[in-house]
Amino acid sequence: MGKIRTFFMVLGVIFFAIIVFIIARATFLPETPISGDKIGVVRIEGIIKSSDRYVKLLNRLEKNRSVKAIVLRVNSPGGVVGACQEIHDKVEEIAKKKPVVVSMGSVAASGGLYISVPATKIVANPGTITGSIGVILQVYNVKELADRLGIKVVTVKSGKFKDLLNPFKEVSRDDVKILQALINDSYMQFVEAVAKGRNLPIERVKEIADGRVFTGRMAKEIGLVDELGSFEKAVEIARELAKAPKAKIYEVKPKRSFLQKLLGEEGRETLSNLARILNGQVESFNLMYLLN
């Protein structure tokens, strides 16, 4: 029995080592080179919390002379205002040099729309959910619960508004006034970006910029989308604009760490959040261009 147990233990260790080797190899394996003209593809999926990895990928495609056009596949409900603006600005910059075609997936709303509007062309499926032009800020307020539980929070601050939206205090009218000003300014930046990118009058954009959502077909009727179709149609349009009918698809992806490969993005983020909590780090609130 002892020998059998030892055999299976060794077999398990070998199996585990093989799995680790495969994941590590996939993590560090270099991209297979593609010759000739290319249509670069970048996918933006999920809530946009940071712009860094997307801007880096777009920079790579911008500098690559064999990439004749870019297809930005957007499947996102939006995200943090600053991150969306940085991606928007990079798309706008590249579109002056080579065609950028946005292919909207199931959802390309709020910040997903914001990053799309400076593109050369926007293609959406008839049932794509888009629109949701607006800004939102939400936090929990637990003052009443804390009072019931006898929880006291001591705050030492340098100015009257340093603890805006402190969840353990009553929200004052002055607090709301300051935050509403932030919301209004960010909202107007969104409206102006849509008006400029889609060549629409600002007053016309304001009429539809009340947070409502549209299908892709509705969005085409009001000028937020150019064409209806799939990812494949967006690629064909990119080839036409670039005058490169034989260009091959060249998809670039952010490099992922071994931990990301092993646990997935959600698992890695969960561990990171747990580590921040254990270290006493709390994320500050963010203004969001987010479908809600």
Image (tube, grey):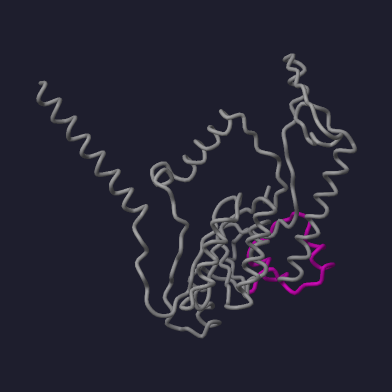
Q: Residue furthest front?
A: 158
Say if 29 sits above or below 277 in the image.
below
Residue at figure coordinates x 71%, y 41% from the top left = 285
- The answer to which of 194 and 38 lies nearer the viewer is 38
Residue furthest to the top: 150
Direction from residue 117 to residue 42 in the image, left or right: left
Say above or below: 41 vs 256.
below
**Which residue appears at 25% of the width and 41% of the height?**
17
Q: Is residue 111 above or below residue 155?
A: below
Q: Residue at x 77, y 72 (%)?
A: 200
Q: Is residue 179 left or right of residue 26?
A: right
Viewer-proximal residue, 210 or 10? 10
Hey, which quadrant is residue 13 in on the image? Answer: top left
Question: Is residue 206 shown in magenta?
Answer: yes
- The picture places residue 219, in percent across and down from the top left corner, at 68, 66
Q: Quadrant of residue 284?
A: top right
- Considering every residue shown, the one lying at the far bottom of the view is 243
Quarter of the image containing the N terminus? top left
Q: Residue 287 magenta-drawn? A: no
When the figure is inspected, residue 110 is found, relative to residue 224, above or below; the finding is above
Residue 277, image quadrant:
top right
Q: Which residues are magenta?
A: 198-226
Q: Percent x, y for residue 67? A: 48, 76
**Percent of width and height locating residue 162:** 81, 36
User: Which residue is drawn at the image coordinates 24% and 44% (left, top)?
Assistant: 18
